[in-house]
Image (spheres, helix red, strand yellow):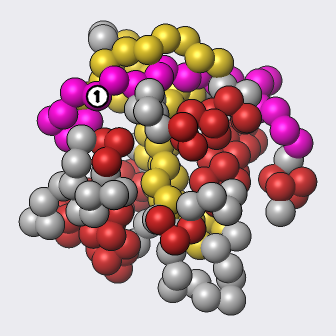
């Protein structure tokens, strides 16, 4: 498995992730198909400007056009303070196979190697057991349960935080492969 930067050609993958009721069940429901090209364009621009890392999860180098999902790291203002947030989505046919955990770990290792982003926060829905399990298994600390906004919807989420420089547990990416 490897991560690659998001590209303008990733519209179909974004549609499969963001417009699907199953994929978006924990995130307030599916997004409308209209505007997905603009979302991809915006993500490519954020990546190019260095304001975000937006990676596509590619399960096998033998099939580089097959995408299992995304993992992203970005900074934004919340409650008057700036924080770095990580988020991920894994398509149903790739769930339960470790791709999400490996992708999150890889991105956190990149943040550690570049000494960038500082503390990293994650906000999976309280009912999203797999994502909360990823946080727990990689060394995130549970801070609180809170309401968060996503795409105009307020969700109940667990607030996790990790310092990738000192708290990332479970060996290295090579150990997970």
Considering only vertical position in the picture, is 125 above or below 23?
above
Q: Is residue 67 left or right of residue 170?
A: left
Q: Is residue 21 left or right of residue 102?
A: left
User: Which residues fall within the magenta stretch?
Assistant: 150-171
Examine the image and state in which quarter residue 41 appears: bottom left
Q: Is residue 171 left or right of residue 114?
A: right
Q: In which quadrant is the N terminus drawn?
A: bottom right
Is residue 61 at least partly visible in the picture?
Answer: yes
| Residue drawn where x is 68% and y is 82% of the image | 61
Examine the image and state in which quarter residue 43 appears: bottom left
Considering only vertical position in the picture, is 108 above or below 142?
below
| Residue drawn where x is 10% and y is 66% of the image | 34
Considering only vertical position in the picture, is 28 above or below 177?
above
Q: Is residue 103 left or right of residue 22?
A: right
| Residue drawn where x is 50% and y is 59% of the image | 90
In this view, the residue farthest toward the left is: 34
Assess disc 1: are there few (<14), some (14-19) or many (≥20) residues with their C-alpha within 10 Å of its C-alpha.
Answer: some
In the rendered image, residue 104, in percent from the top left (x then y), is placed at 62, 47
Is residue 18 at least partly visible in the picture?
Answer: no
In the rendered image, residue 98, in percent from the top left (x then y), is placed at 69, 57
Q: Which residue carries the number 1 mark?
A: 155
């Amino acid at each position: 498995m490897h991560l690659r930067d998001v590209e303008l050609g990733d519209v179909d993958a974004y549609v499969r992730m963001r417009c699907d009721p199953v994929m978006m069940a924990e995130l307030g429901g599916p997004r409308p198909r209209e505007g997905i090209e603009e979302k991809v364009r915006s993500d490519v621009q954020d990546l190019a400007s260095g304001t975000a890392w937006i990676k596509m999860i590619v399960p096998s180098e033998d099939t580089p056009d097959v995408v299992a999902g995304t993992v992203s790291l970005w900074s934004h203002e919340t409650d008057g303070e700036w924080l770095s947030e990580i988020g991920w989505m894994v398509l149903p046919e790739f769930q339960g196979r470790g791709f999400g955990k490996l992708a999150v770990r890889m991105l956190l290792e990149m943040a550690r190697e570049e000494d960038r982003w500082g503390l990293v926060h994650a906000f999976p829905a309280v009912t999203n057991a797999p994502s909360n399990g990823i946080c727990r298994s990689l060394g995130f600390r549970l801070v609180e349960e809170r309401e968060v906004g996503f795409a105009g919807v307020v969700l109940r989420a667990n607030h996790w935080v990790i310092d990738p420089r000192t708290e990332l547990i479970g060996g290295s990416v090579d150990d997970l492969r």
